[in-house]
Image (spheres, rainbow, N blue to C red):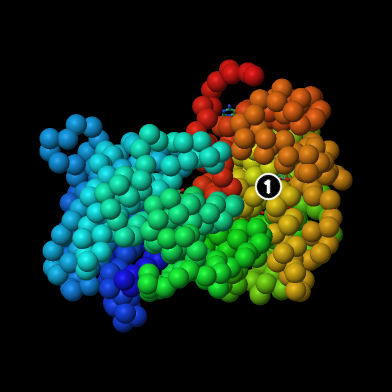
Amino acid sequence: MKIGIAQLNAVVGDFPGNAKRIMAAYRECLEKGAEIVIVPELALVGYPPRDLLFKSQFVPKCLQALDYLADEVGEVPMLVGYVDFCEPETVGKPFRNAAAFLHEGKVKHKIWKTLLPSYDVFDERRYFEPGECCDPIEWNGQRLGITICEDIWTEDYLYRPLYERDPAEELKGKGIDVILNLSASPFSQGKPQRRWEMLAEVAKEAEVPVVYCNCIGGNDQLIFDGNSLAVDAQGRPLAALSAFAEECRVVDLAQTGSDEHQPADTCEEEENYQALVLGLRDYAHKCGFTTACLGLSGGIDSALTAALACDALGAENVHGLTMPSQFSSGGSVDHSVELAKALGMTCDTVPIAETFEQVKSAMAPVFGDQPEDVTEENMQARIRGLFLMSLSNKSGRLLLTTGNKSELAVGYCTMYGDMCGGLAVISDLPKMQVYALSRWINRDKEIIPWDTIEKPPSAELRPDQKDQDTLPPYETLDAILELYVEQHLSAAEIIDGHGFDENLVRWVQRRVDLNEWKRFQAAPGLRVTSKAFGMGRRMPIVQRFSD
Ligand SMILES: Nc1ncnc2c1ncn2[C@@H]1O[C@H](COP(=O)(O)OP(=O)(O)OC[C@H]2O[C@@H]([n+]3cccc(C(=O)O)c3)[C@H](O)[C@@H]2O)[C@@H](O)[C@H]1O
Ligand SMILES: Nc1ncnc2c1ncn2[C@@H]1O[C@H](COP(=O)(O)OP(=O)(O)OP(=O)(O)O)[C@@H](O)[C@H]1O
Ligand SMILES: NC(=O)CC[C@H](N)C(=O)O
C-alpha cells in the first residue's frame, strides 16, 4: 500500500485556507502515486484552537469545510483531522478531537481520539470527550488502525505509564495491517529523537508498520517540527520527512526499512535555530506582519534575536535602533552597526541621554533628595521601550523583545522597559544556549561580532555595570534553573543532591517565585525546551508555598 503523507502548516481557524492547502497536498500525493493520503491532527482547524472551540459557529464552520473536502475527494481516500460535536446523548465535554475517512464524495468513517493529553502545554480535556478506540477500517484488502497523536504516547518523559488504555494494543487485538497516526506534536529539545524511538517501539509491539504524519509551523508559543516518519513492522525507517518545512511524500509499505531512510542527524543548535526561525516567521506572518524592529545594544541577546529575525523575515524587513546613553560602552553602537552590516539589515541611532536627563529633572520635585538607584536604571530601559514602541507604531513593524530564559526566570529585566514588545523570540533559551547558538551561527564566518559574544554581559544602565554584579555566573544560574524550573526540584534537593550553595539556591528560588507577575505580563515566547514559561507552566502569582 502506498501512503501519501502530507506534512502541512495550518493556520488556526482559517478553514478555507486550510482546506485549500489540504486539497493541494492531496493532489500532489495523487500525482506521486498515493493510494491513500493522510494529513495531520486537526489539520482543518489548526492546533491548538483553544477556546475558539466554544464560539457558536466554530465547529459548524469546520464541519462545512469537512463537507467541502469530502466533495473533492475521489477514488483515493483521505484521512483528515478535524473537530466534531459529541453525539447529543453523550455526557461530558461537547467536542471530539476527530479524524474523518473521506472517500468518493462522502465522509465514510469518523474516528475519535481516545487519549487526551492534559499536561504541560496540552489542555484537551478542557474541550474534548475521549472516544472509544475505533475498529480498524477496511480499505483495499487492508485493515487500517487509526490513531490520533497522543493515542500512541502512553508513557511520559520518565517512561511512566500515563493511561490505563493502550489504543495501539487494542487495535492489534482487533487485527490490523498498519497503524496510521495523525499528529500535532510540538517541538522541544530532544523530542524528534524520542518520537523516533517511540514509533519504532510501537511498530515492534504491534508487529505492523506505523505511518506518522505530523504538522509543521508556529502557532503562538508552539512550534511544530514535522519530522513525519514511517517505519516497518520491525521499527526500521521507511521514510523520514523534513524538519520545520512542509512536504508531501509517498511511502510504499511493501518495502523493507533501512538505515538509508534514517532521519538526518542534527545538532541541538541547528534544531533550536530552525525552530526559532520558523516560530518567529509564522508568528509574524500569521499575525499579518511582514517587518520587525528591535533595540540593538551591542550585546549578545539582541544580536542573536536580530540574526534570527533576518533569516525569518528577510534582512531588508528588519530594522534596529541603537540608543546609547552616557553609560553605554563604545562597543554598544559600533558592534550594533557591525552586526547590522553583516546581516544586511538597516539600523538608526537615537541617543537617549538627553531624554533621560529630562525625565529625571521632571521627576526631581517628586523624588526630592533620594539617591539614584534602580529607578533610574529602569528609566533608561523604559525610554528605550518608548522609542521602540513609537517606531513600531509609526512603521507597522512587530517589536521583538530580546530577553533570554535565565533573565526572565529571575526577573533581570525591566517591566515596560526592555520587556516591551510583541514576541519574545529567545525567552525559552537559557543564556548558555544563547552563547552556543550564537557561536553556531558564526561557525563558517563572523556574523555576530566575536567581541559581542566574548565581552562580559552588561545591561549598561550604570557605570561599569556587569550582569554578574547581580547574578551568579550563567553556568551556575542555568544549572540551578534547569533543576528548579524544568525538573521541579525543591531547594533541599538541589542543594543536597547536586551540591549547589544553599544561599545561591535560595536566592534563585526566591527570585523565580517573586517574578511570576513579570512573566505573566511578558510577551508570548517561543517554546523550545520541555518546560517553557507561559501556557505550559501555570503558577499562581499570589502564593506562600515554601519547600
Ligand atoms: N507581585 C507583583 N505584582 C505586581 N507588581 C509588582 C509585584 N512585585 C513587584 N512589582 C512591581 O515591580 C516593580 C519592579 O519591577 P521593575 O520595574 O521591572 O524593576 P526591577 O525588577 O526592580 O529592576 C529591573 C532589574 O533588571 C535589570 N535589567 C534591566 C534591563 C535590562 C537588563 C538586562 O541586562 O537584561 C537588566 C536592572 O538592572 C534591574 O536590576 C516594583 O516597583 C513594583 O511596582
Ligand atoms: N544601548 C542600547 N541601544 C539599543 N537597545 C538597547 C540598548 N541597551 C539595551 N537595549 C535593548 O534592551 C535589551 C536588554 O538590554 P541588555 O543590555 O540587558 O541586553 P543585551 O545587550 O542584548 O544582552 P546582554 O544581556 O548579554 O548584554 C537589549 O537586548 C536591547 O534590545
Ligand atoms: N497533540 C497531541 O496529542 C500531542 C501530545 C504528544 N504527547 C506530543 O507531544 O506529541
The image shows residue 174 at horizontal and vertical percentages of 26, 49
Q: Secondary structure at mark 1?
A: loop
Can the viewer see residue 547?
Answer: yes
* Mark 1 beta carbon near ligand 2 (under 8 Å): no
Looking at the rendered image, the quarter that the N terminus falls into is bottom left
The picture places residue 46, in percent across and down from the top left corner, at: 35, 56
Q: Amino acid type of disc 1?
A: Pro
Q: Quadrant of ligand 1?
A: top right
Please determine whether, in this image, residue 315 is positioned above or below residue 285.
below
From the viewer's side, name the closer residue of 352 and 68: 68
Residue 245 seen from this side: no
Tell whether 340 sits left or right of 20: right
What's the residue at 17%, 35% (across, down)? 90
- Identify whether 353 is placed above or below 416: below
The quarter of the picture where the C terminus appears is top right
Residue holding disc 1: 430
Q: Quadrant of residue 23?
A: bottom left
Q: Nearer the viewer, residue 205 or 493?
A: 205
For the point 71% across and 48% down, the residue is 431
Question: How dense is the environment of label 1, judged by Cα within 10 Å: few (below 14), some, or many (20 and up)?
Answer: many
Q: Which quadrant of the structure image shows residue 315?
A: bottom right
Image location of residue 356, percent across then percent down? 72, 46
Percent coordinates x, y for residue 217 in the rendering: 45, 61
- Report whether 160 appears left or right of 337: left
Which residue does the image show at 15% across and 59% down from the upper left?
Answer: 108
Q: Residue at x 68, y 47 (%)?
A: 430
- Judged left or right of residue 210, residue 263 is right
